[in-house]
Image (cartoon, rainbow, N blue to C red):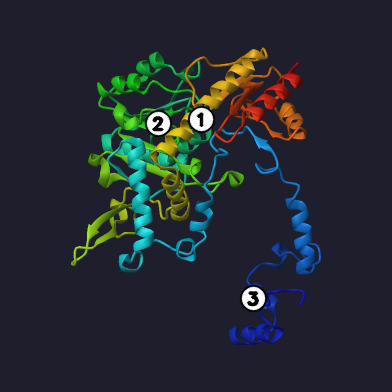
Amino acid sequence: MEFRYLPMTKEDKQEMLEKVGVSRTEDLFSDIPKQVRLNRHLNLQKPTSESQLMKELTKKANKNVNVKTHTSFLGAGVYDHYIPSIVDHTISRSEFYTAYTPYQPEISQGELQAIFEFQTMICELTSMDVANSSMYDGPTALAEAANLSAAQTKRKKILVSKTVHPESIEVIHSYAKGQGIEVVEVDHKDGITDINALENELNDDIASVIIQYPNFFGQIEPLEKVQQLVADKKTMFIVSSNPLALGYLTPPGEFGADIVVGDTQVFGIPSQFGGPHCGYFATTKKLMRKTPGRLVGQTVDEDGRRGFVLTLQAREQHIRRDKATSNICSNQALNALASSVAMSSLGKQGIKQMAWLNMQKAHYAKRRFQEKGMEVVFSGSLFNELVINVKFSVTDLNKALLEKGFIGGFDLERVDKNYSGYMLVAITEIRTKEEIDVFVEEVGAHIG
């Protein structure tokens, strides 16, 4: 057979037409004026056999460059990290990949426990009291945090550091517009938030201050200084954080953060063309009932056996209507499970070691770039990303690197014309010394 799927026969079609009282398919469109109808066939190729189509699509797919065919130094929010093989084995089990929202706890204990473990590990990494059952991605989680701060403080103005990921800032603006919230972007100095500029913007009208840690440039922000500024103004402190970095860095909760959000793509989720990902949202006990999405809790049944239930559900579909604190209607349960399995497989020491390797290899790359006479733009502490000045088109450089088997860094000119010639390079734990050395050599050779 040429086609695997036969949705209906000619007889089926005629029977349906007769049932609705028409003789031709065209009669179904009789209410549409003839002058706006498309009176020709669509300009499409003739259908082909399934086997021929598979050959054609496979040939096209093989043209793609990916992290298996090339060595990647691209980050900027999506990273090439080690994924334990057990992750794919676990999330491929049908009871997980077919599961929907666990409304019935009596038949959803596995799914509920997986979400509960995810929440628990996020709380441990961030040093926060509670975490929800995952959100779409890091940027939407951050925007939800901004909305929550405005609702909680009854203030309509938030400050966002320009070192926050540009795409996250765009999402914040989108969310804020509907809520009538003013978003003020604070400049940076040497790659980190300008503390003086932040202090000048702070007043009693500010709902929250948003900082990324490590920030978009890979730099480590001075969270303690920021917290000291906002504490005097009773302004909420929101931190967007790479959870892998928290395996080694002091967590935001210890700096007095009110809300910590981020994306767990770094744990068990491939880059896969930029998504889907899995956002997390962690906060204090005080804000627990304002948290968007859902929270899974642990309890015991009438026989004293451990069990799990949806404890808090803040969205509008759970009979809250106008009292809802969020319109998040789903969660990334399967991706959250992937992250949970990855974190469990690595363990506390494994995550710490993985984070440490990211830092050490990034610092090694920094030294190698400097030894080759290339400018590393910012001088502060960094995690696993750094900015280099290649002094000419990063786009052209990346095309040349692609020919040498490398996926180059992110072209910062794409987000700010002032960064022409600046490349954001990511170095993760799976990059070897040899790969880093050759990459530095190739970059140096092409920029002279």
Q: Is residue 380 above or below residue 108?
A: above
Q: Amino acid at mark 1?
A: Leu
- Separation (CA) of disc 1 from disc 2: 40 Å
Q: How far from the left and from the top, in percent, is residue 41? A: 78, 66
Q: Residue 28's mark?
A: 3
Residues packed near mark 3 inside 10 Å, few (<14), some (14 to 19) or many (20 plus)? few
Locate residue 11 relative to residue 59 in the image: left or right.
Answer: left
- State the residue at coordinates (68%, 19%): 390
Locate residue 178 relative to residue 232 in the image: left or right.
Answer: right
Q: Earlier in the sequence, mark 2 or mark 3?
A: 3
- State the residue at coordinates (29%, 59%): 308
Occupied quadrant, residue 232: top left
Q: How far from the left and from the top, in percent, is residue 128? A: 30, 37
Residues packed near mark 1 inside 10 Å, few (<14), some (14 to 19) or many (20 plus)? some
- Classify mark 1: helix, strand or loop: helix
Task: Report the front residue among 130 and 33.
Answer: 130
Q: Nearer the viewer, mark 3 or mark 1?
A: 1
- Classify mark 2: helix, strand or loop: strand
